[in-house]
Image (tube, rainbow, N blue to C red):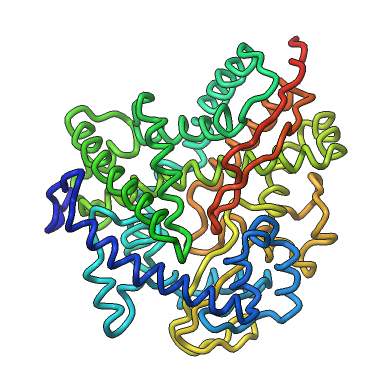
Amino acid sequence: MLLLDRQDRVPAERDPVGDVRAAARWVGEHALTRAFFEHAARSGELFARIDCDPALRADPYPAYEELRALGRLVPGRVVSATTDHALTTALLRHPDVRVGAGLRDLPGPLGALGRWGTDPWATGPIDPPSLLAIDGVDHARLRRLVNRAFTARQVRAQEDLVTATAERLLDRIERAGAERTDLVDAYAAQLPVAVIGAILGVPERDHRQLRAWGNSAASLLDPGLRWGRYRRASTAVRAMHRWVTAHVEAKRRDPGDDLLSQLALLDGDGDDAVLTDLELRAVALLVLAAGFETTVNLISNAVVLLDGHRDQRERVLAEPDLWAGVVEETLRFDPPVQNSLRVVPRDLEVDGVAIVGGTPVLLFLAAANRDPAVFDDPQVFDVARPNANAHLAFSSGAHYCLGAALARAEARIALQMLHERFPDLRVDGAPRRRETRVLRGFERLPVAPGRVAARA
């Protein structure tokens, strides 16, 4: 059963009221946050500098080690932070620790501004009712519904599609015969979009547009956006909401065996099978955006790491069983998601650390993945590392990434097929990092494919 929201009318493409709400929300959630962080960075606060300094964002790992030396939990003016693997894991798994609260949850005028600025047709990936922004029974209910598309059986079924899509894209690169190609555009981004498109029943003609919207919407994961980026991201999210609404209506008229068809046709039997219109849109938007953002960054990060560690690449080409290890070590060494925010609602002792109630804690997942208490020689990229999968790249606990198994399978197949087709592939030119801070990957990755391997 689909329950319509009070504001279920699809807004016009140009919506002045929506623009005003977006501006109000930007002031509260981004302009003020940016001001706080810039002030803290000027005062020398290390994790504020990581957020604000482009040089530290380009290579944050030395700064993470400086932060680690300051203790397991480092207090700050705006938030506290941790790089500790055990504490991060405990916070992610603690039943009383919440995902980061939004502006609307604050008391007083700021909370009122946030609630007024909330637009159900512009809710992004970290706005309720997104799975990234809710806890407890609501989170469990939505997660059970979405999980049906990401079971082990479903992932195995998608592997044939991943292989066929990779083959088609590599054939296209081979036929083009170019000395240099952008691997993100030609391969790393197209592959996961095709897979997520199949899961949601998205026509191939819409893949490129959804990818563009998703790239813009991903900016909303970052705090402190400037107005121009925030407005572009909000515009993309509003367009995605309109597209999803039309797509769901088409699925009701002509359903398939995809996830959106299943959710759109829920019959209302049991509490799980009740979705509001906004919940359905939030599920679709999250799967569309998060479903390929993590994977495209994982693939591109792995290619660059293998290019910079030729001994590791030669080893895995000689020992193909190590491709799964390449994926796990990339997730540990340079993960697509760098950090996550949690709020401790009351005074708690977590893994032996006393935390004052109301404290927001920034969990540096990428730094926890290099904790020397867990990983031997953590600054070394080792595709045969025996405990690489102890990383926290996909989070942990109730919010563990639903699509983790699918992302692993996509990356493993994509990387193996790419390097076996083009064994001399190398980065050719300067890759361009994405501007995002929570997500880490490449916007552009120029490579020289080199010779094509002889086929049996």
Image position, residue 140 (x, y; %): 37, 61
Q: Residue at x 77, y 31 (%)?
A: 320
Q: Residue at x 20, y 51 (%)?
A: 277
Image position, residue 20 (x, y; %): 22, 61
Image position, residue 353 (x, y; %): 63, 85
Q: Residue at x 87, y 38 (%)?
A: 311
The foreground one among 180 and 89 is 180
- Relative to 17, does residue 42 appear above or below in the rendering? below
The foreground one among 348 and 333 is 333
Quadrant position of residue 58? bottom right
Q: Quadrant of the C terminus?
A: top right
Question: Is 124 left or right of 377, judged from the image as shown?
Answer: left
Quadrant position of residue 214? top left
Question: Is 235 left or right of 329, judged from the image as shown?
Answer: left
Image position, residue 195 (x, y; %): 47, 32
The foreground one among 14 and 167 is 14
Question: Is 119 left or right of 56, judged from the image as shown?
Answer: left
Quadrant position of residue 16? bottom left
Question: Is 429 left or right of 49, judged from the image as shown?
Answer: right
- Relative to 112, does residue 277 appear above or below in the rendering? above
- Relative to 54, does residue 417 appear above or below in the rendering? above
